[in-house]
Image: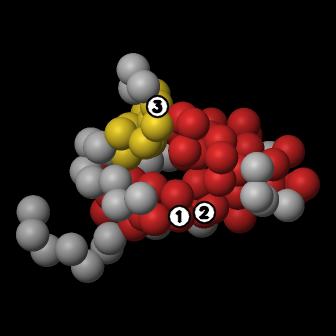
Amino acid sequence: MEALSETAKLIMDVFKDVKVGKNGSLLAQILLNKKNGWNRDNQDNFGQALKELEGAGYIREGKNGLILTEKGYNYLYPNDKRF
C-alpha cells in the first residue's frame, strides 16, 4: 500500500464520508465544498493530490466528477470481504 500525502488522504476521506461505493462517482461540487474548509496548505496541494491519486489508480475522472476505482475502494475499506 502506497503512502499518500495528507491532502490525498483528505480527498479519500471525502469519498468515505459520502459513502461512495466501488466505481461510484463523487460530484466535483461536493469535493470543492469540502476543500474550502481545509487549511491553506491542503488547499494549495489539492491539484497535486488529485494527480497523485489518479497516478496511484485510486480515482479516475468521470463525466460528472471523480470515480472511485476498485483499488481506491480497497484502500478505504481494506477489510471488506463482500467482493
Question: Is residue 49 among what the camera can see?
Answer: no
Between disc 3 and disc 2, whose residue precedes? 2
The amino acid type found where label 1 is placed reads: Asp
Q: Where does residue 49 sit, x and y in percent of width and height?
A: 67, 46
Decide: is 64 above or below 23: above
Residue at 9% x, 63% y: name it: 83
Work out how far the residue at label 1 is from the one at label 3, CA to CA, in angstroms. 16 Å
Work out how far the residue at label 2 is from the one at label 1, CA to CA, in angstroms. 6 Å
Badge number at residue 61: none
Q: Are marks 3 and 2 in contact (CB under 8 Å)?
A: no
Image quadrant in which you'd find residue 75: bottom left
Disc number lying in front (2 or 1)? 1
Work out how far the residue at label 3 is from the one at label 2, CA to CA, in angstroms. 18 Å
Residue at 90% x, 54% y: name it: 40
For label 3, the residue is 65
Q: Where does residue 36 sit, x and y in percent of width and height?
A: 76, 50
The amino acid type found where label 2 is placed reads: Lys
Viewer-proximal residue, 33 or 62? 33
Residue at 46% x, 31% y: name it: 65
For label 2, the residue is 9
Which residue is farthest right?
40
Q: Where does residue 6 sit, x and y in percent of width and height?
A: 71, 64
Decide: is 22 above or below 17: above
